């Protein structure tokens, strides 16, 4: 019974944070191509949707670009969403990298490392069968306000 009371107390404590949920959006990153937000802020945590290599200025999909160019654009798009909430790449605590081909991992990792020089976030990288619009990479992230 004590465990149930503790769980209920923790659940009740989380409700005010959920009530403070807000959408983060910017024109400096690609608009969502489905029923999702660029990012959602809950309390001091920001959950960033996966970004793919779409140029936000032109709306052009860069799926024919090199993995290095695609990775750069994806990370720049994440950076723009973070900036819309006053954050930087240094606020990211976790990323998930989805790749079409892990043979491109070293090339992706070289670019990725330039964005996270000090205290890189936790990361999971997985190869997937297919990504939206047949791109080679998608990256999602979680960031925290100080």
Image (cartoon, rainbow, N blue to C red):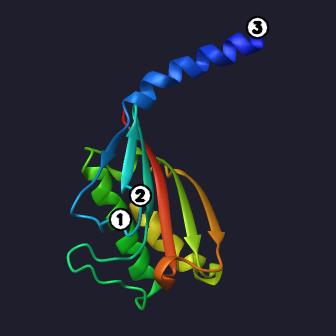
Look at the image and tell me in which quarter the N terminus lies. top right
> Which residue is more in the foreground, 116 or 43?
43
The alpha-carbon separation of the residues under discs 2 and 1 comes to: 6 Å
Return the mark for residue 134: none
Q: Quadrant of residue 66?
A: bottom left
The tag on residue 36 is 2
Q: Answer above or below: position of 146 versus 136.
A: above
Quick one: 13 or 70, which is closer to the camera? 13
Which residue position is annotated with label 1?
Answer: 32
Residue placed furthest toward the bottom: 64
* Rendered location of residue 73, percent (x, y): 35, 73
Determine whether 26 is above or below 110 in the image. above
Residue 117: in sight, yes or no?
Answer: no
Q: Which residue is mark 3?
A: 2
| Residue drawn at x 55%, y 65% as measured from the top left | 97
Q: Position of residue 124 (x, y in %)?
A: 62, 59
Instruction: Locate residue 115 relative to residue 2 in the image: left or right.
Output: left
Circle 3 residues within 10 Å: few <14, some 14–19, many ≥20: few
Q: Quadrant of the C terminus?
A: top left
Number of residue marks: 3
Residue at position x 43%, y 74% in the image: 71
């Amino acid at each position: 019974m004590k465990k149930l009371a503790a769980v209920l107390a923790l659940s009740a404590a989380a409700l005010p944070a959920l009530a403070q949920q807000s959408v983060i959006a910017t024109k400096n990153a690609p608009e969502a191509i489905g029923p999702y937000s660029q990012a959602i802020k809950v309390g001091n945590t920001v959950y960033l949707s996966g970004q793919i290599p779409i140029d936000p200025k032109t709306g052009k999909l860069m799926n024919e670009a090199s993995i290095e160019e695609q990775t750069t654009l994806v990370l720049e798009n994440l950076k723009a969403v973070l900036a819309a909430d006053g954050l930087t790449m240094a606020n990211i605590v976790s990323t998930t990298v989805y790749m079409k081909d892990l043979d491109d991992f070293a090339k992706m990792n070289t670019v990725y490392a330039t964005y996270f020089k000090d205290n890189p976030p936790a990361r999971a990288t997985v190869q997937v069968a297919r990504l939206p619009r047949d791109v080679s990479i998608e990256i999602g992230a979680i960031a925290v306000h100080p």
